[in-house]
Image: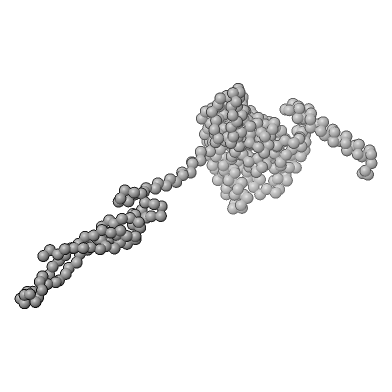
Amino acid sequence: MRDTKESRLLLVLLIAIAFALITVDIRGGQESPVDGARQAAAAVFGPVEHGVAAAVDPVGNAIGAVRDSGERHNRIAVLERENAALKARLGSDSRNRSRLNQLDSMLKKAANGQYGIKAAEVIAIGAAQGFSWTVTIDVGSHDGILRDMTVLNGDGLVGRVTTVGPDTATVLLANDPDFTVGTRMESTDELGFATGQGDRPLAVQLLNGKAKVKKGDRLVTFGSQADKPFVPGVPVGDVVRVDPSGGGLTRTIYVRPYASFSKLDIVGVVVQAPRTDPRDTVLPPKPRPTPTPTVTVTITPCPDGRLPEADEQADCTEKGTGDGDGTTGNAADTHASTRPLQDASASPSATPRASASTGTGTGTGTGTGTGTGTGTDDE
């Protein structure tokens, strides 16, 4: 087409129509007038996305082994058997090992919360209905998926199903600004509503403006009426920042979600809610704080009562006064002498005799001590 005035006008008109449809879709919400067209598009393009994903994914068929884990009867044993079968089929490829770890973690969470889930793979990011944070998964109405079902993975809450086709479904992620979920705080049971903020932490508005909250507190989903769109007990995230109370009726905190929305691969759609609220049992164990080493220094006073200086040894041997052992300045002198008691010329018969003499002395020294002594003979 040549660049003419008519072609430019047509381009502007098409852009205006596109923005008008987006606006009508967003304002319409769940009752959007273009919902029928969206479902028709999902029915047409869903099989194409599904076929492409199956062609390039070596474990696409393996995950089907765990898609029927919705039965409550002996569910943990069933999940363990399916997990073992899938491990045998995945092999040792590094990518498959990563996906196997994701699947294993998700199955354990489903078992802890007694959720009946349909395993699925993320096959597309984003959708044609606007600028929402969404993904497309490879299960649909043929697999028992319905609108407003909870979606989770091995880390925690992922989102909820918004559109369902025969073989695919669209999931609105929890970090989308239009996403809201009721939350309950671990232990204290404080209730609130979490809203997505894109790349930033979730903003949670607590209903109790005087609630006591601290960094590191953890939240789970509170659950919806008839368990749609949210089942109770799914881990949401932990608190990273708390706004001052300010005396208002509500209080805002910020929560880092457990799920990483930029690295989604294996997810599960909750097709069967638990009989009872699992409360906090699905939360991961709390990390143990790393102990801080403590160093205790004991200073032994010198014999004279003073404390040794920084450059002295603990036993005060470098600058200390004598302690009687000869190494620090005190000395003990013992000597033996042999001398005549009188002059030999005075008495020719005189014989010399041995005499022992002892002496004691005190002294000071640096390092090793020397001693001098004086003594008197015991005649």
Q: Position of residue 269 (x, y in %)?
A: 63, 35
* Direction left: furthest residue: 349
Above/below status of 185 relative to 337: above
Left or right placement of residue 26 versus residue 107 in this view: right
Quarter holding residue 233: top right
Measured as percent of width and height from the top left, residue 164 is found at: 71, 34
Residue 274, quarter of picture: top right
- Of residues 8 and 89, the one drawn nearer to the viewer in this rendering: 8
Nearest the eye: 176 or 49: 176
Q: Is residue 206 visible?
A: no
Identity of the residue drawn at 30% across and 61% down: 369
Which residue lies at the image location 48% right of the left edge and 41% below the top edge? 288
Q: Name the residue rendered at 34%, 49% in the picture.
A: 306
Q: Which residue occupies the extreme front position in the image?
A: 346
- Residue 361 appears in the figure: yes
State the residue lying farthest toward the top.
249
Q: How many marks?
A: 0
Q: Position of residue 353 (x, y in %)?
A: 10, 71
In the rendered image, the quadrant that contains the N terminus is: top right
Give the quadrant of the C terminus. Answer: bottom left
Question: Residue 232: image x %, image y %?
Answer: 58, 30
Relative placement, left or right, of 127 versus 293 is: right
Q: Nearer the viewer, residue 291 or 347?
A: 347
Residue 155 location, quadrant: top right
**Is 102 located above or below residue 211 in the figure?**
below
Q: Residue at x 61, y 39 (%)?
A: 259
Q: How is the image coloured?
A: one colour
